[in-house]
């Protein structure tokens, strides 16, 4: 079974409200934005995607970069964030950037510059032998 939202290209948010909550002191956030299949111009929730959402909801499981329970009050709470329910405040989905070795890149650039200079000399020599002006 597949679930898709027709006629919209914007992200979809599902809110579940219960009067008699078993856990009234926190809210469970689930970010399933990376769990779908792209079919032509639509994103489709596959059965395993829906099952993961339902299992996470039922068990109130916290999974890094997917779900998190957040207290209504106290430190790092919804109240401290002025009751802003923006998903990115609570579920961090950002991937750490790869470290860049500047010294290695500088050595690569220097080696490339030396190769270019050597190639330019070879081309200049060929041009001289052929009696044509050097292009640079």
Image (cartoon, rainbow, N blue to C red):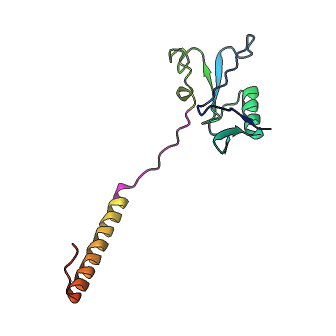
Rendered-image quadrant of the N terminus: top right
Q: Quadrant of residue 2?
A: top right
Vertical position of residue 9 compared to residue 71: above or below:
below
Q: Nearer the viewer, residue 118 or 100?
A: 118
Q: Is residue 121 visible?
A: yes
Residue 49 drawn at (x, y percent): 72, 38
Residue 97 drawn at (x, y percent): 47, 46
**Residue farthest front in this picture:** 7
129 on left or right of 50: left
Q: Quadrant of residue 18?
A: top right
Measuring 68% from the left and 14% from the top, which residue is drawn there? Answer: 24
Measuring 53% from the left and 26% from the top, which residue is drawn there? Answer: 89
Whether 97 is among the magenta residues is yes
What residue span does the magenta drawing correspond to?
92-103
Q: Main secondary structure of the magenta part?
A: loop
Vertical position of residue 85 compared to residue 111: above or below:
above
Measuring 66% from the left and 31% from the top, which residue is drawn there? Answer: 62
Whether 110 is among the magenta residues is no
Residue 118 drawn at (x, y percent): 27, 77
Residue 133 drawn at (x, y percent): 19, 80
**Residue farthest bottom in this picture:** 129
Q: Quadrant of residue 93?
A: top right
Q: Nearer the viewer, residue 116 or 104?
A: 116
**Residue farthest top in this picture:** 19
Q: Nearer the viewer, residue 113 or 6?
A: 6
Rendered-image quadrant of the C terminus: bottom left
20 on left or right of 75: right
Tag count in the figure? 0
């Amino acid at each position: 079974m597949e679930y898709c939202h027709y006629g919209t290209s914007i992200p979809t948010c599902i809110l579940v409200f219960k009067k008699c909550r078993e856990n009234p002191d926190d809210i469970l956030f689930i970010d399933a934005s990376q769990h779908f299949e792209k079919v032509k111009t639509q994103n489709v929730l596959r059965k395993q995607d829906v099952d993961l959402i339902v299992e996470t909801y039922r068990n109130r499981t916290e999974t890094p970069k997917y779900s998190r329970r957040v207290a209504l009050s106290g430190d790092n709470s919804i109240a401290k964030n002025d009751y802003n329910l923006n998903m990115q405040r609570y579920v961090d989905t950002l991937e750490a950037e790869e470290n860049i070795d500047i010294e290695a890149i500088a050595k690569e650039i220097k080696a490339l510059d030396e190769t270019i200079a050597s190639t330019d000399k070879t081309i200049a020599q060929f041009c001289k032998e052929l009696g044509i002006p050097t292009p640079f």
